[in-house]
Image (cartoon, rainbow, N blue to C red):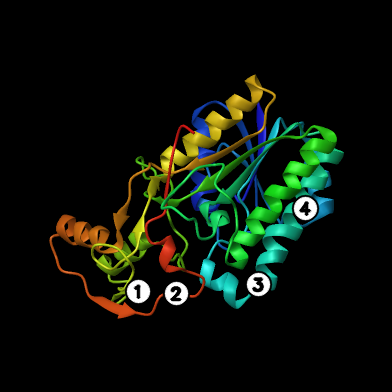
Amino acid sequence: MKILLTGGAGYIGSHTAWAAVDSGINVVILDNLSTGILENCPPQAAFYEGDVGNAALLDRLMSENKFDAVLHFAGSIVVPESVADPLTYYRNNVTNSLTLIDACVRHDIPKFIFSSTAAVYGIPEQGTVYEDTVTCPINPYGNSKLMVENILRDVSASCGLQTGTLRYFNVAGADPQGRTGQSSPKATHLIKVAVQYLLGKQDHISLFGEDYPTPDGTCIRDYIHVSDLATAHLAVLEALRKNPENLTLNCGIGRAFSVREVLETVAKVANRPLSIVSAPARPGDHPLWSQMRTGFGR
C-alpha cells in the first residue's frame, strides 16, 4: 500500500507517518514546513516540500505515484488565531483542502482520511457528544473543518470517493521511542506548554479562565494520546479497505481531566512547583465547552 500524507512533518501527521512505516506502508509526505519539522519525519518516507494548495505539484505527485489513499493533516489548528484571522483559516483549511480533494478525484485515488475536530460540535446541550450530535461550530476553526466534512460528503455521493473523518478531542503525548513529538515552537497545547516551562523555555504558564462551571473552575478536557490517534488512522484505513461505507468517528477516551489537575500532575512528576499566572478565557472558547468529552457506542 502507498499513501500520501499531507502535513506529515507536523505533530499528529509525523506520528501517523511513523506508525504507517512501522506497519510496512509506503509513505509519501507533503508538507510546506510552515509549522512542521522535517527531522520528525521517518527517513523511510519520501518527502516533498510544498503546499496542498499547489494543484500543479499535486498533479505531479499523483501522476508519479499510484496512491491507495490520502491522509490529510495539513491545516491551521489554533482556535483563538482563527477568531483573529478567519481568512487565513478558510484559505488554509477549506480552499487548500478543496484543491487536494479535486486532485484526488481527477487521479482516481479511492480513499481519503480527514483530520477533523470536536470543535465542529460547537456548544452541545450535554457534556458528552456522539458522532450523531448536532454540529454547530462557534468559531472559524470549527467552521472550516465542518465545511471540508460537508465537501467530502457531497463529493463521495457524486463520485464514490470513500472517506474517513476523525474528529479529535485533545491530543497529547509523544512517540514512546522518541522519534517525534510536539516540536512546534508556538504550540499552545497545555502539556506542551507545561514541559516548556520545566525546560526553562518560558517563565510561566498561563491559566486561561478560572470561572468555568466545573469543580475547580478550570476547563475539563478529554485527552487522547497521539500514538493512539495515529493507530486510529491506520485502523480507519483498514476498515475502509474492508467495508465500502464512509466513517465519521470521534477520537477521545471518554474521560476528562481539568486543566488544574493536569498541571498538578505535571508538578508532582517533576517534583517542583509551577509558576501559574491567571489569564482571561481565550477568544473562541465557551464555558459550555468546559466539560465536553466523547461518547461511544450509539
Q: Residue furthest front?
A: 125
Answer with mark 4 or mark 3, whichever residue precedes in sequence: 3
- 149 horizontally vs 209: left or right: right
Q: Nearer the viewer, mark 4 or mark 1?
A: 1
Residue at image position (63%, 75%) is: 85
Give the crowd class for mark 2: few <14, some 14-19, many >=20 residues within 10 Å: some
Question: Callout 2: helix, strand or loop?
Answer: loop
Question: Between marks 3 and 1, how big is the CA–CA gap?
Answer: 23 Å
Circles 2 and 1: CB distance less than 8 Å? yes
The secondary structure type at the circle numbered 4 is helix
Q: Position of residue 227 (x, y in %)?
A: 42, 40
Front residue (pair 102, 9): 102
How far, Cα to Cα, is label 3 from label 2? 15 Å
| CA–CA distance in space, label 4 to label 2 | 29 Å
Residue bearing the label numbered 2? 282
Report the residue marked by disc 3. Answer: 86
Q: Is residue 182 left or right of residue 157?
A: left
